[in-house]
Every structure is written in structure tokens, then in C-alpha cells.
Amino acid sequence: MFETLTERMGTTLRRLRGRGRLSDANMRDALREVRMALIEADVALEVVGTFTERVREKVLGQEVLRSLTPDQEVVRAVRDELCSLMGNENAELALNVPPPAVILVAGLQGSGKTTTVAKLSRWLRQEHRRKVLVASCDVYRPAAIEQLRVLAGEAGVEFFPSRSGEDPVDIATRARAEAKRRHQDVLLLDTAGRMHVDSGMMDEVRRIHAVAEPVETLFVVDSMTGQDAASVARAFDRSLPLSGVVLTKTDGDARGGAALSIRQVTGKPIKFLGVGEKLDALQAFHPDRMASRILGMGDVLGLIEEAERKIDREKAKKFADKFAKGKRFDLEDFGEQIRQMRNMGGISSLLDKLPGTGQLPEHAKSRINDTEFVKFEAMINSMTVQERRFPALIKGSRKRRIAAGSGTRIQDVNRLLKQFAQMQKMMKRVRRKGGIGRMAQGLTGHALPGFPGRG
């Protein structure tokens, strides 16, 4: 998310480098570029105007601090305003209430409500160790109830059964009573959506809200609808007391206009981002971290948290122990590192959280994708255990067999072996001299900003 905005912001701020003072002329040009970047990101026009005016007031005519350059002064002002625009800090769920804490989820059809309910239930179970019951009040969409039942099983939470034709208000009432009887910590209610906001839909969800008495009423909206997402959220908020917003499909949204508009337009905080289709693809929204990512500063805290959640610690420890003992790095190790990286969202997702990678040239960014690593993993899986441990064995006939078994070409196998040989050399250097920069350079083929390259 925000790829286009990050690129435009980076270009604009770099133009201010080397100037000793922020003047009317250079700030006017810079703010014009910032304004155009926000408009291209599909940010609501009322938000664009307010944002640029606040930045202008903060920096125009100020003497640059002794340790700062003008672009850093502007970056600071832009980052502060981005944080303010999106809410400054993470808005946590209000769960410190007598159980069960009821969370009502509403939104339009197709926004991803049911999947979000399942993701949120999994997040509550794993991150907060809460006992969760989920129930569907959507008696109109075919298979909605069955979909939630299946997803609840995958998420490892309890499911409250309901049937098409039942009164949604009655379902909510019984589900709340059942959650209390079972001593559940949280009850998540999935409600029906429509193709657009209508009076019948709003009346029904208001009645459900009245009997469920939720501590949180979350509005789920597709981020790819841009500033329209903020408009729909505002329409819902007029009829329903929303406590927060969940933006879905942000992994497919390069603009990010919804994230930058919703808080300002509705006054409601974004609480979560849906970042993929899998049940673990839900992230708590941190405005300060998002602001840093927009300005190419990365999100190191987010990267650390992602690693803590998704890296297999036992496998990582075995690899570290093997590495410490001086044993040879082989293709089995290489394959495992690729799997761990893909579990964390792939190389593009990792680099997005590293400081400075937004400043990489476009041709370098285009080379950093997961396609090659997917091929590498397929080829490694097509090898025998002996071949993985002793890559020197892989010659002509073995290369043909590996290529045929993985749906690749012999040239791809040669490229894997060449990349692996470079990785082996790099691992030897890291063991001998240390330095994460050399490891990053070996993985991506070039030095990353913020890390030392080959000396």
C-alpha cells in the first residue's frame, strides 16, 4: 500500500536537499507536488487541503535547525501531519469489560466482513489468549453461515450455529446468551451486507446492535474503493455508533487514499488492516509506523513483530547452531530460509518495512520479487536429499530431472546453483567477519540503504 505516494513524496523531498532555508518559492513547489501525490492516491479533497495547509504553516519561513537540512525539516512536518491525520497511535479494542465482550461487524456486501470476523477471532485467540465465539446474523447471502463455520474451524474458535430464515435479531440474542453460558471472553457477530446502504439494512443492524450491546462496532470496508470508502463509512456512522474501521484488501491497494481519509472524514480510527487472504493476514493499525513507511523510513518494529509471530523458532535455532558450529550451508538450509521468508510475506513485504528501500531505483525494485524464490523452492523440492546436501553432484542428467520435476528449465537450475554458490560465499564471510549488510546484499543482489555493502 502507498507505493505511488511513497515514490512521489520521496522525489519531492529530495528536491529540497541542499537548500539552507525554506522559502515561499521552494515550499510552494514542494507542497504542490505533495498535493498532487495525495490526489493521485485518491485521498478526499477536503483532507488534501487541510493536510497541505497544516504542513505549510509548520515549516514555511522557519530557520532550519543546525543539525537538520530543509528536506528533513519538511519530512518531520509531513510525518507529524500524517500521524495526526491517521490518528497518532494505535486504537486498541475495548476488551476490559465483563465477559462476553461483544464485537459487531458491519459493512457492505463484498467488503470481506465474514473473512475479517474469522481473522479477528484468530488474532484475539493468538495475540490476547481470549476464548472466542463467532456467530453469523447473515441469513440472506447463500452459504454465508457455512462459510463462517468453516473459517471458525480453521481459526480454532467456537462457532454458534444459525440457519437461513431465522430472525437475525433472535440469532444475536441467543448467541450472546450462549457466549455467557460457555464463559467465552469475546462474541463476534457477523451481520448481513448489501450492495449499497439502504434503510432496511440499517434498520436491521440497528436492532441487532440494540440487543447485542456491543463494546465495539467495527465497519469493514474495501480499501481499493479509495475516498468512496470514507463516504460509505460516514453514511454508516450516521445510523450506527461505529467505534472503528477495518480496511481490507490493502495488499492490492497501491494508492492508500482510504487510509488517509477515513479518520478525518468520519472521526473514527482505523483499528486493523487486512493484508491478504490467509487468516493470519490481519494487522493492528499503527499510524506512526504507517507514516514512516509512506516516507520511506520503513517499519522496523513491525518487521520484528512479524518475525516473532511467523518465524519457526525451533528451526531458526537449529540453523543458528549449525551456523555457529561452522557446518556447511547447503541447499536444504537455503530452501528453509526461502520458506521462512515467504511465511513473513515474501521479500517485497520485508523490504517494504526496511528503512530506505523506498529510495531504491525503479529497475532495482522490479528485480526484487518473489517469483524467482518460488521457482527456487520448487527446484529444491525436486531434488533428492543427497543433492540438497551435496550440490556438487548436480550435473547434466540431474539438472534435466530437477527442471522437469519442478516445471522449470535447465537455465533456471543453473541460476539457482549460481545464486546458491554466492550465498555460500556470503555465509562464510558473515561467519568470519559478521555483518547483516552482506547478508542483505547477497539476498537481493545489491546493497540496501542503511546497511553496509561489500567492503
Image (tube, rainbow, N blue to C red):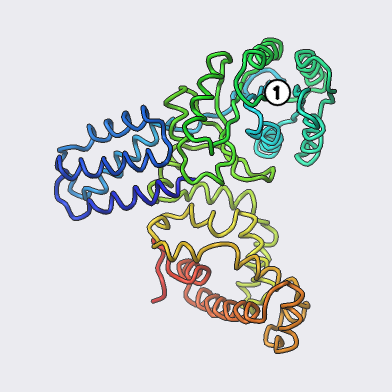
Residue 95 x %, y %: 63, 24
Q: Is residue 40 visible?
A: yes
Q: Classify residue 59 by image quadrant.
A: top left
Under mark 1, the amino acid is Thr
Q: Classify residue 146 by image quadrant.
A: top right
Residue 405 x %, y %: 77, 74
Q: Quadrant of the C terminus?
A: bottom left
Instruction: Identify the residue shown where x is 58% and y is 81%.
Output: 418
Above or below 115: residue 362:
below
Viewer-nearest residue: 309 or 202 = 202
Above or below 68: residue 386:
below
Instruction: Identify the residue shown where x is 41% and y is 45%.
Output: 294
Instruction: Identify the residue shown where x is 55% and y is 21%.
Output: 243
Number of marks present in the image shown: 1
* Residue under numbered circle 1: 191
> In screen coordinates, is 207 left or right of 36?
right
> In screen coordinates, is 42 left or right of 315?
left
Question: Which element type, helix, strand or loop, lies under badge 1?
Answer: loop
Residue 211 x %, y %: 71, 11
Q: Classify residue 257 by image quadrant.
A: top left
Viewer-nearest residue: 379 or 127 = 379
Above or below 338: residue 136:
above
Instruction: Identify the residue shown where x is 45% and y is 27%.
Output: 263
> In screen coordinates, is 265 left or right of 235?
left
> Could you classify mark 1 by the number of other residues whose Cα lies within 10 Å: few (under 14), some (14-19), or many (20 or more)?
many
Residue 58 x %, y %: 24, 34
Q: Is residue 186 visible?
A: no
